[in-house]
Image: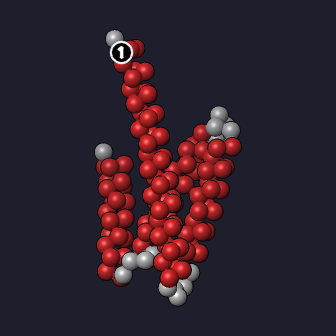
């Protein structure tokens, strides 16, 4: 009975992961478009956008290295680099989203980010 349920659960998990990838890439692309549009219509500094570009380069390098190192020899390194890439991608998304916001909304965005990190830390270290 369990053998019949496992393929269903695996296909559901795979579809859910694919959906998450599509959603994350769509959100990140939209955030970049909003930030670029904001910089085109205003005469603001590109400091935040430069930071996002550096983060994207670091994210790509983490994913690149984690994908191509031998997971049999370096399993922990591969997993850690993948997790670092996801963490930096979330950080880059929050930075990109907050670029066009006024200061009060930027603070709210960073409070949401901080609460998310706190929940992750509590769930991983306390339970």
Residue 47 position, x and y percent, is 55, 80
- Tell me the quadrant of the picture where the C terminus can be found: top left
Name the residue rendered at 45%, 40% in the picture.
17
Residue 37 in percent (x, y) is at 50, 74
Q: Nearer the viewer, residue 21 or 26?
A: 26
Percent position (x, y) of residue 51? 56, 73
Q: Is residue 106 left or right of residue 69?
A: left
Q: Residue at x 61, y 50 (%)?
A: 63
Task: Please name the colour scheme applied to the rendered image.
Answer: secondary structure
Percent position (x, y) of residue 61?
Answer: 65, 56
Q: How many marks?
A: 1
Q: Nearer the viewer, residue 70 or 42?
A: 42
Q: Which residue is mark 1?
A: 2
Residue 91 visible in rendering:
no
- Compared to residue 23, the image places residue 40 above or below, namely below
Q: Tell which residue pokes out farthest to the top in this image.
A: 1
Residue 78 occupies which quadrant of the picture?
Answer: top right
The reply, left or right, for residue 47 in relation to residue 111 is right
Mark 1, Cα crowd under 10 Å, few <14 / some 14-19 / many 20+, is few
Location of the N terminus (image quadrant) = top left
Q: Residue at x 36, y 82 (%)?
A: 103
Secondary structure state at the residue bearing disc 1: helix
Residue extending furthest toward the bottom: 43
Q: Who's the residue at 60% across and 69% down the image?
A: 53
* Location of residue 114 by image quarter: bottom left
The answer to whether one can see residue 113 in this image is: yes
């Amino acid at each position: 009975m369990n053998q019949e349920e496992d393929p269903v659960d695996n296909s559901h998990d795979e579809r859910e992961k694919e959906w998450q990838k599509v959603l994350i890439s769509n959100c990140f692309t939209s955030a970049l478009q909003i930030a670029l549009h904001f910089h085109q219509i205003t005469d603001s500094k590109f400091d935040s956008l430069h930071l996002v570009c550096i983060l994207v380069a670091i994210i790509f390098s983490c994913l690149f290295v984690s994908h191509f190192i031998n997971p049999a020899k370096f399993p922990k390194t591969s997993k850690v680099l993948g997790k670092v890439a996801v963490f930096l991608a979330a950080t880059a998304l929050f930075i990109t989203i907050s670029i066009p916001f006024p200061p009060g909304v930027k603070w709210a965005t960073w409070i949401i980010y901080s609460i998310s990190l706190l929940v992750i830390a509590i769930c991983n270290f306390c339970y």
